[in-house]
Image (cartoon, grey):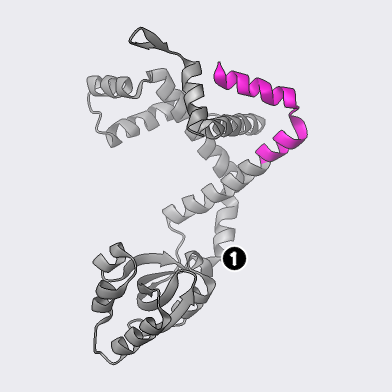
Amino acid sequence: MIAINNQSIADIDIVKNLKKDVQYKQVWQRIINQKVIEKAAKERGITVSPEEIQAEGDRLRMEKKLYKVSDTISWLAEQMITVEDLEAGIGDRLLSQKLAEHLFKQEVEKFFAQNRINFEEVLLYQIIISEPRLAQEIYYQIKEQEISFYDAAHCYDIDEKRRQVCGYEGKICRWSLKPEIAAAVFSAKPGIVISPIKTAQGCHILMVEKFIQAELTQQRYQEILNNMFRQWLASEVNYILYNQIEPEEINQLNQKIAS
């Protein structure tokens, strides 16, 4: 327990502060999630070995450049946790990942194949202008080569950050674009400026640099897996809260968090 000016900081003070900062529910939700994960893993015989925890701990230390034992001890002190706390957290994360793999590994490729079109990507440039008439005028100026797309973006875009990069939006998935914009973008030819499209944000003038075919990379595999697992976990938690847990039990969980 920590004391400041002879006033101790207890766990209950941390709970009160979480409530005041409207973060209490998030912590409560994480605890419920972990309980559900542990129950589901136990039912399926899924465990995490000490060797797996050690290997992940070593990887984490390398990632944080904690090459010496003294470096690790100092870092743990800064985080106000023990080695046991760190290993418990690593174990929870590994258990969650192994359960997700067990539940949905076979479904990821199937989902990707069925939704491949939504994972197509584009290197995109964009100018957003609030006034439709001005957007149309700038579009014609670009088309007639009176001004370049990049200069127009630098001068007229409503977003300062986009002005600084001359309209460059980077690599964007089809699913992240509004339907009307996605339809125009993925039917355009690279280098050809697309006439203004009006949305709630303003009038969009767009230009494709390059199309990128959808691939099931390791990163995308993990994103799909995580999304499937989050949806499953939310469903399981809701089922337990509304069908199995009595109000008194929820109160007991609240008390455990505060204890």
Q: Please report the residue visible at 66 percent of the width from the left and 37 percent of the height from the top.
A: 237
| In this picture, residue 134 sits left or right of residue 238 | left
**For numbered disc 1, what is the local secondary structure?**
helix
Within 10 Å of disc 1 (Cα), the crowding (few <14, some 14-19, many 20+) is: few
Is residue 26 visible from the viewing direction of this image? yes
159 on left or right of 147: right
Q: Is residue 220 left or right of residue 112?
A: left
- Magenta residues (range): 236-259
User: Toward which corner of the image does residue 238 lie, by quadrant?
Assistant: top right
Q: Quadrant of the N terminus?
A: top left
Task: From the top left corner, tell me how far across and down residue 208 is, in percent.
Answer: 36, 77
Residue 39 lies left or right of residue 158; in this view the side is right
> Residue 141: which quarter of the image?
bottom left
Where 257 falls versus 21 (above or below)? Answer: above
The residue tagged 1 is 114
Res 84 quadrant in image = top left
